[in-house]
Image: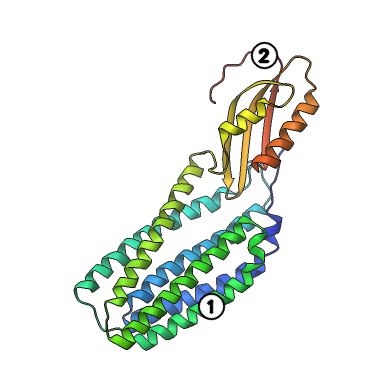
Amino acid sequence: MEQQITLSQASKNKGRLKFVLGFTLLYLIVEVIGGIMTKSLALLADAGHMLTDVGGLALALIAINYAERKATGQRTYGYYRAEILAALANAVVLIFISVYILYEAYLRFLDPPKVESKDMMLVAVVGLLVNIAGMLILRKSSGESLNMKGAYFEVLSDMLTSVGVIVAGVIMLTTGWYYADPLLSAGIGLFILPRTWMLLKESISILLEGTPKEVDIVELRRTMLQVEGVADLHDLHVWVLTSGVNAMTAHVILKKGAATKLVLQTLQEHIKNNFKIAHTTLQLEVPGFIEEPTHL
């Protein structure tokens, strides 16, 4: 029987996510235009960072929308992996953006142009207000689901970057030291890269059916073997369907005379409550059933 897993808590917050995404996207456009007009690489770099926020918020909405779709005969797990493919594409694009920001910062260190500091600060202040508003909207719901928490931290990180742009603007306005612009830009580029690299690694790991980092598969196996009635197990697999939704399969060899229904119920409750695995498939095998294990 197919099992459809829904992100009900996140679904309740679709309206909030859409609202924050709309404002963030609008400010991204304003920041790009402002960066070009003021010749501020810091604003353009922050726009690159803002793009990560737009991508993160959009992915959160994609995850919710696709998780609400029913599984089909062709997509028995639903459409969860669309989020992962989008995250992978987002990571690749952002790596190129970060490298370009660092390259532009290097060129500006050699010959820093005059930056319209007042206009730059004005745009950054607007961005700061947008991010603060987004944080207030998402703060309560960030504790209700992993998806919403990720969206909240995206906005929080961009709020801190906006503060940095304002500080750079103050420095240039008061001292005329225009190296502050490429210096901050390089900092933003370096700030984006590690996050993007982690997103890329996590996306690839999920697509390769890697074990979730929050699941200790050795401990999972050990504790399953301690359940009364379990003699041994093999072909244990744990993987990620999408962010926050893990699945597993295992072949469990029962002891002679074991209460099958009780063993199955105990195992499923143990796995769900202690390892946060939402979708579990267990094949129970009787003593003497010969099947060559192919994996762990």
Residue 89 visible? The answer is: yes
Quick check: 158 above or below 6? below
Residue located at (39% from left, 81% from top): 34
Estimate how packed mark 2 is, as few (under 14), some (14 to 19) or many (20 or more) residues with alpha carbons within 10 Å.
Answer: few
State the residue at coordinates (33%, 79%). Answer: 40
The location of residue 87, given as percent across then percent down, is 49, 54
In the rendered image, which quarter contains the N terminus?
Answer: top right
What is the tally of numbered marks visible in this picture? 2
**Mark with earlier residue (1, 2):** 1
Question: Residue type at mark 1?
Answer: Val
**Label placed on residue 130:** 1
Q: Is residue 181 left or right of residue 145?
A: left
How far across and down, in percent of the image, does residue 226 sit? 68, 26
Q: Residue at x 57, y 16 (%)?
A: 292
The C terminus - image quarter:
top right
Tell me if residue 284 comes above or below residue 54 in the rendering: above
Q: Nearer the viewer, residue 163 or 63?
A: 163
- Taking the image as shown, residue 79 lies to the left or right of residue 89, namely right
Which residue occupies the foreground of this view, 225 or 17? 225
In the rendered view, does 200 fall on the left or right side of 287? left
| Residue identifier under label 2 | 289
Q: How far across and down, in percent of the image, does residue 133 sit?
A: 58, 76
Label 1 vs label 2: CA separation?
A: 63 Å
Residue in the image at 33% along x and 75% along y = 41
Residues 52 and 268: in front is 268
Percent position (x, y) of residue 173? Answer: 33, 87
Graded by Cα atoms within 10 Å as few (under 14), some (14 to 19) or many (20 or more), the crowding at tag 1 reads: some
